[in-house]
Amino acid sequence: MIERFYPNMIVDSIEQIDLEMLKKKGIKGLILDIDNTLVPSFIKEADERTLKWIDKIKRNGFKACILSNARKKRVEQFNEKLGLKAIYRASKPGRRAFTKALDVLGIDASQAAVVGDQIFTDVYGGNRLGMYTILVKPIHKQEFFFVKLKRYLEKYVLRRYYSDSK
Ligand SMILES: [Mg+2]
């Protein structure tokens, strides 16, 4: 079933995420991808834009943690200014990564929203556990070959998604 790859929401950027709507849905915590969701993969540290948005979600009462498949150094360096709970080498879309994130946040799957740019890691992984999933359009085109390959498959899923939701 292709529906397992469908996000609950698609946004152009993190700023577009409707926090009031998430509150109404009972969402208490956000599980965040880094690369191409918050910043392009070549930006090593959290930028102003990310700092501002994380501050905003905190002020709105949301908990947040980072869940990234990137290596330790990348995640720690990025998280330095943010000081969030962070899980690196997460092996998304594996269930364990997401279960760990829920433990860290101290919430249930039904209270969690996953925010990420990849359908087959972030969205699929979150959907598997019944989380709310938010697909952010990838920030930057410069990606590794394997990711590029997955983008073609993602386009197929999105075409189906949009035609199904008509
Ligand atoms: Mg990503």
Image (tube, rainbow, N blue to C red):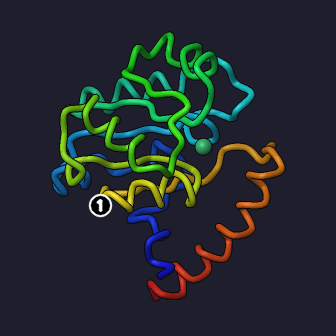
Quadrant in the rendering for residue 102: top left
Judging by the rendered image, the residue that carries numbered circle 1 is 130
Q: Front-most of 28 and 71?
A: 71
Image-based side of 48 in relation to 67, left or right? right
Q: Residue at x 60, y 54 (%)?
A: 137
Residue 134's place in the image compared with 51, above or below, is below
Residue 37, position as x, y percentages in the image: 57, 42
Residue 126's place in the image compared with 30, above or below, is below
Residue 47 in sight here: no
Mark 1 Cβ inside 8 Å of ligand 1: no
Residue 30, position as x, y percentages in the image: 33, 40
Residue 28, position as x, y percentages in the image: 20, 41
Q: Front-most of 40 and 52?
A: 40
Quadrant in the rendering for residue 76: top right
Q: Residue at x 75, y 68 (%)?
A: 152
Residue 118 in sight here: yes
Image-based side of 35 in relation to 57, left or right? right
- At label 1, which amino acid type do we have? Gly
Residue 60, position as x, y percentages in the image: 23, 33
Quadrant in the rendering for residue 159: bottom right
Judging from the image, what secondary structure is the residue with disc 1 in?
Answer: loop
